[in-house]
Amino acid sequence: MMNQVKDDQISLEDIDVPEKIPTKFINSRVIVFNPLYASYLYVKKGFFGSPLGINKPRLEYFSKPSELSLIEAYYLLERDEITIFDVKEEKFLNPKKFHDLAKKIHHKFEEKYIIYKDLRGRGYIPRPGLKFGADFVVYKKGPGVEHSLFMVHVLPHDSEISAVDMVRAGRLATSVRKKFVIANPLTCSYYFFEWFKP
């Protein structure tokens, strides 16, 4: 008979993680059902995923599945770190097929992915920024370790941003004490805006 292990007795250092962590694609969402693997991706691999039902996860094992954003999932799939099993189609998705699906589901997927990948390559940790009204909030060390450094709005090269949009974004960024950044995916350029009182 196996002894039941309590959550606080689990160390992520001791778990046996497969070479590719299994995930499932269900109703346009990518879920890591195994809490050990979900914890590993979040704590050990650089803050991938959001544990379901946990608002602010601690940097240790959590006992819930997690959801990867489509951008995070594609990044990890491209790097051969996860598998994605499409439950409806009953087959594994390769990067091209998943990319095509994600483009249909996620507005500005390609543009956002270019910037996400570039920020990861520069050593930053981009996280979904929807609650801040941005595409990403960006950390150097990670959420729960520090406050985010800036919020990023990805602007496709053929888009326009009005003065009103700029002021609105600036006010939002200032209210949450973050820098506001516009990212151009065509050139991977970043434009920082700071507001000050004259």
Image: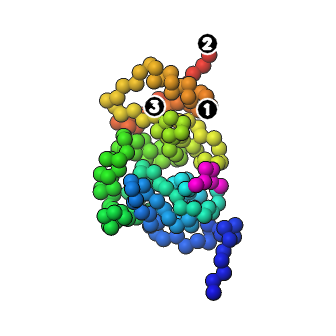
Q: Going by the picture, which residue comes out furthest to the bottom?
A: 1
| Residue range (magenta) | 53-58
Q: Nearer the viewer, residue 77 or 25?
A: 25
In this rendering, position of residue 140 left or right of residue 7: left
**According to the image, label 1 marks what residue?**
176
Q: Residue at x 65, y 55 (%)?
A: 58
Q: Residue at x 51, y 24 (%)?
A: 168
Q: Residue at x 63, y 50 (%)?
A: 56
- Type of the residue with mark 1: Val
Of the numbered discs 2 and 1, the one sitting upstream in the chain is 1
Numbered tag placed on residue 168 in the rendering = none
For residue 189, which quarter of the picture?
A: top left
For residue 111, which quarter of the picture?
A: top left
**According to the image, label 3 marks what residue?**
182
- Type of the residue with mark 2: Pro
Of the numbered discs 3 and 2, the one sitting upstream in the chain is 3
Note whether 48 is above or below 171 in the view shown: below
Note whether 168 is above or below 5 in the view shown: above
Q: Going by the picture, which residue comes out furthest to the top?
A: 198
CA distance separating discs 3 and 2? 23 Å
In this rendering, position of residue 140 left or right of residue 161: right
In this view, the mark in front (2 or 1): 1
Mark 3 lies on a secondary structure that is strand
